[in-house]
Amino acid sequence: MVRDRVPQAREDDCFQAKEARDAYLAWAHARRTIYDVAKENPHRVKLLEMFEGLYDVNACEQGMGTEARLEHRQKHALPILEVIKKYVDSLTNADVLPKSDLAGAVGYLRNHWDHRPTRASASSPA
């Protein structure tokens, strides 16, 4: 079998690359739900600024080694994710009309938060 001939290190690299891609796509999709909210909504602007912070963290990591990337993400990305989570959880029905596009985006984030990669691994984007 071909799989038996693939060195373990290469197999691990493939798994980490898939994990990194999946993490990136998960957060990109979450950001997209916010982006699609009406432009005049102040919560949209605030949340997009927070997501921009995650992209900034990722941009600073270009050229870093695995350990440096992990340390950088733990220091910079995890606090941003915590702020996003607190902000989303602080929004009440008074802030977000139940049938609004923002309610859909916030609901998506809340419903999928536990399934999103929130750890700052060296192989996955912030």
Image (tube, rainbow, N blue to C red):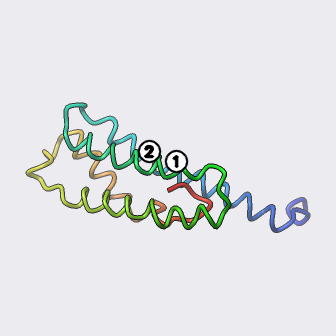
Q: Secondary structure at mark 2?
A: helix
Snapshot quadrant of residue 5: bottom right
Q: Residue furthest left?
A: 94
Instruction: Say left or right for 70 vs 65.
Output: left
Real-space Cα separation, disc 1 to disc 2, in angstroms: 6 Å
Residue 110: quadrant of the picture = bottom left
Type of amino acid at the residue the image marks with label 1? Leu
Is 5 on the left or on the right of 91, as rendered? right
Image position, residue 109 (x, y; %)? 33, 54
User: Who is closer to the viewer here, 114 or 119?
Assistant: 119
- Does 101 sit left or right of 66 as displayed? left
Q: Contact (CB < 8 A) between labels 1 and 2?
A: yes
Residue at the image point whose x is 87% and y is 65% from the top: 7
Residue with the most extreme top position = 39
Question: Could you tell me the amino acid type at mark 2?
Answer: His
Q: Is residue 33 above or below residue 88?
A: above
Q: Residue at x 58, y 53 (%)?
A: 61
Residue at mark 1:
25
Q: For residue 6, which quarter of the picture? A: bottom right
Disc 1 packing (10 Å; few <14; some 14–19; many ≥20): some
Q: Is residue 54 left or right of residue 122?
A: left
Say which mark, if any, is on residue 29: 2
Circle 2 packing at 10 Å, graded few (<14), some (14-19), many (20+), is some
